[in-house]
Amino acid sequence: MKLSPSDRAWFDKVLRAIAAAEAGPSDADLAHAPVLSDWKAAISPGGHVILWGEVADHPLLGTSSITTSQLIAINPEAGWARTASRWYRLGRSIDVIAAELAESMNGKEALAGSINFTLPGFMNVDDPALLAQLLAQYIMRVREIDAADRAASGREE
């Protein structure tokens, strides 16, 4: 399998993002990262795992509602996510908003599961284990494609 130059550039970018995610963010990475709040993981119509939500201080988009590029890694407990393009600091998730909304409705726990925020055309990924599995599969597939391209190009490194 030989990738086109534009596909090769994309895979190189993703491979750098994977390496960065595996090393974890530095304090400087997070200090300069935009903040994504009211966020949720989802699968795009094209089958890519992304985050959607409200971003602040994005270097290209400023403050707006966004969908990110391909999600590479996420650690909500540590407050960060890595996409193909950049690091994000994570604010509260949309799930926290749903729980707060359900609580405000007279504390009726039965309502908690009935409040569901979605992005039209996208499928939310609600299970953290499934999200981790999807990200691991994506990384494995990227590495397979990279190896096949390097072999086809005679650049086995």
Image: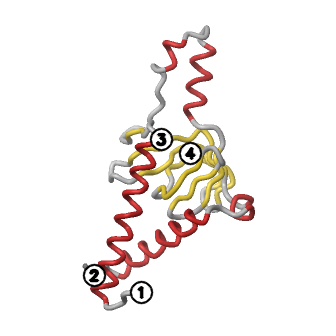
Q: Amino acid at mark 1?
A: Glu
User: What SS does tag 3 mark?
Assistant: helix
Nearest-to-viewer mark from 4 and 2? 2
Label 4 vs label 2: CA separation?
36 Å
Residue 2 - label: 2
Residue 1 - label: none
Label 3 vs label 4: CA separation?
23 Å
Q: Report the residue marked by disc 1.
A: 157
Q: Report the residue marked by disc 3.
A: 128
Along the line of sight, the residue nearer the viewer: 6 or 1? 1
Circle 3 Cα neighbour tier, 10 Å, few/some/many (<14 / 14–19 / ≥20): few
Residue lying farthest to the bottom in this orientation: 154
Please identify the quarter of the rendering in which residue 106 is found: top right
Q: Report the residue marked by disc 4.
A: 65
Nearest-to-viewer mark from 3 and 2? 3
Label 1 vs label 2: CA separation?
15 Å
